[in-house]
């Protein structure tokens, strides 16, 4: 596939919240074992079992999963979307709208629909309801809840097969505060906070990452029914973007100009537009995954190299200083 994606370029310059990176470092799986387990799984080209998990945008006007199924005709897309779903909050006091509480039943439902064939892909497009005004004081818990959700998916018995590959999709924009109901005030601000956080989670946990926010924002008046719900044209944009990432097998271009001075390693970014971050490697072991092009490292770390990672998780060749 030709590398023409521009959806991953960050149009919003927000620093990820520190608690997110702390949560990543406390994972029960270290980066090395994660890399070996998830980066080396052979990806299926067709005939994939895909479980889509979304909120009301997954069902209104047919939803993006239905549009995705129309594109991926050789795959089976099972849609487990429901209005009101969050990543990890009891929306409106309902535990049934908390995906983190119920993910095991969603996965079991997917296996039942597939006649116990292993699930190959899980696509998560949530976060809109987690960004409602009532969750303002809990906004720093959304990304850590996403980490817990990823870990639960990977702990699930996938018909004795490896865990499914996970794609994290950012929520679409909210309309400006002047146009939304009281319950949605500040929603777009909170969604924008999630964009770099979700990217960092994807980097740390070897997930795919799809940033639909800038694509929908640029045409919001044409694709939104109201303050947040998409029409069929909007769902088509989301589905086409996700499909392009799922069908991307081409490695990105590597970074260049690596320099290691004392405890700082820096490099020039990859020229590929769909790169979401970089993996710093020492002696064939991933020691850090970052979106930046500079990291500070202990003095005793040697044999360093850096490779670029794109939205699906394809990696470039590793480049040394």
Image (cartoon, rainbow, N blue to C red):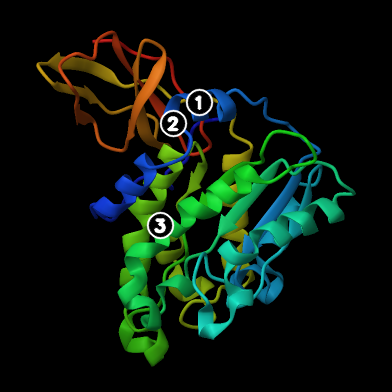
- In the displayed structure, 43 sits above or below 159; it is above
- Toward the right, the furthest residue is 115
- In the displayed structure, 258 sits above or below 2; it is above
Give the CA separation, mark 1 to mark 3. Answer: 22 Å
**Tag 3: Cα neighbours inside 10 Å, few (<14), some, or many (≥20)?**
many
Percent position of residue 243, x then y: 63, 46
Q: Is residue 285 left or right of residue 148?
A: left
Percent position of residue 229, x then y: 54, 76
Image mark for residue 207: none
Question: Which residue matches tag 1?
Answer: 33
Q: Secondary structure at mark 3?
A: helix
Is residue 113 or residue 27 the one in the foreground? 27
Q: Residue at x 63, y 44 (%)?
A: 155
Q: Earlier in the sequence, mark 1 or mark 3?
A: 1
Q: Residue at x 56, y 66 (%)?
A: 234
- In the displayed structure, 271 sits above or below 96; it is above
**Quadrant of the frame with the C terminus:** top left
- Toward the bottom, the furthest residue is 182
Q: Is residue 76 left or right of residue 178?
A: right
Image mark for residue 143: 3
Question: Which residue matches tag 2?
Answer: 30
Percent position of residue 35, x then y: 50, 26
């Amino acid at each position: 596939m030709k590398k023409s994606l521009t959806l991953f370029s960050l149009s919003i310059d927000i620093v990820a919240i520190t608690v997110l990176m702390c949560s990543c470092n406390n994972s029960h799986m270290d980066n090395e074992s994660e890399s070996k387990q998830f980066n080396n799984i052979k990806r299926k080209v067709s005939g994939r079992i895909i479980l889509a998990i979304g909120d009301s945008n997954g069902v209104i006007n047919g939803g993006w999963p239905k549009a995705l199924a129309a594109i991926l005709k050789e795959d089976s897309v099972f849609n487990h979307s429901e209005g009101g779903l969050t990543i990890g909050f009891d929306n409106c006091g309902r535990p049934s709208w908390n995906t983190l509480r119920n993910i095991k039943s969603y996965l079991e439902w997917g296996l039942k629909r597939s006649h116990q064939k292993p699930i190959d892909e899980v696509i998560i497009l949530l976060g809109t309801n987690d960004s409602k005004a009532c969750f303002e004081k809990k906004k720093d818990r959304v990304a850590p809840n996403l980490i817990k959700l990823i870990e639960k998916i990977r702990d699930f018995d996938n018909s004795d097969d490896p865990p499914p590959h996970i794609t994290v999709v950012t929520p679409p924009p909210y309309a400006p505060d002047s146009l939304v109901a009281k319950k949605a005030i500040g929603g777009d601000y909170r969604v924008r906070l999630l964009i770099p956080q979700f990217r960092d989670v994807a980097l740390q946990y070897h997930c795919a990452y799809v940033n639909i926010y800038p694509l929908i924002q640029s045409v919001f008046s044409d694709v939104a029914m109201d303050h947040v719900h998409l029409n069929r044209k909007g769902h088509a944009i989301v589905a086409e973007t996700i499909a392009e990432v799922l069908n991307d097998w081409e490695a990105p271009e590597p970074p260049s100009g690596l320099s290691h001075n004392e405890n700082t390693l820096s490099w020039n970014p990859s020229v590929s537009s769909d790169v979401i971050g970089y993996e710093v490697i020492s002696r064939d072991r991933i020691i850090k995954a970052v979106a930046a092009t500079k990291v500070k490292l202990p003095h005793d770390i040697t044999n360093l190299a850096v490779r670029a990672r794109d939205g699906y998780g394809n990696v470039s060749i590793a480049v040394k200083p």
